[in-house]
Amino acid sequence: MIDIAIPLGSDMSAPTFMKCLCQDCLSIRWLPELMPGMEGGGLNGDGSECACDCGGEVCPCGSCVATAQMLESGVRDPDSLGVRGPINQWNPVTGIRV
Ligand SMILES: [Zn+2]
Ligand SMILES: [Zn+2]
């Protein structure tokens, strides 16, 4: 049972999400930002939102977010992106999966 109270009328009270990148398929995932003091210290807190549906790990670190932003802006060069290539196609939902 999860009790999430979202007060009406206050701005930006909804949970914040951070952009993450799947390390395997390079799709963009959005994970809820961890609350201070949350047990575990990682994204695996509840075990359900830490992985992409391809089974790969998602990472919210700065370099992965930068990679995600480059992909979004049309960069497809694996060397520039710092990923294994080649990237023949990409979209934010399925990444490089066909
Ligand atoms: Zn994936
Ligand atoms: Zn990372």
Image: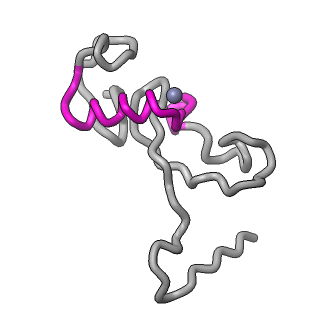
Q: Is residue 11 left or right of residue 78?
A: right
Percent x, y of residue 31: 54, 49
Percent x, y of residue 51: 58, 37
Classify residue 95 by image quadrant: top left
The answer to whether residue 10 is above or below residue 67 is below
Find out whether residue 58 is within the magenta segment: yes
Disc tally is: 0
Asked whether 78 or 92 is in front, the reply is: 78
Percent x, y of residue 39: 80, 49
Q: Which residues are magenta?
A: 52-76
What residue occupies the far bottom of the structure in this picture? Answer: 9
Classify residue 72 by image quadrant: top left
The answer to whether residue 72 is above or below residue 5 is above
What residue occupies the far right of the structure in this picture? Answer: 39
Q: Residue at x 70, y 75 (%)?
A: 3
Where's the C terminus, which quadrant?
top left
Q: Residue at x 35, y 42 (%)?
A: 93
Asked whether 63 or 4 is in front, the reply is: 63
Percent x, y of residue 9: 47, 88
Classify residue 66 by image quadrant: top left
Find out whether residue 1 is within the magenta segment: no
Q: Is residue 91 left or right of residue 84?
A: left
Q: Residue at x 64, y 52 (%)?
A: 34
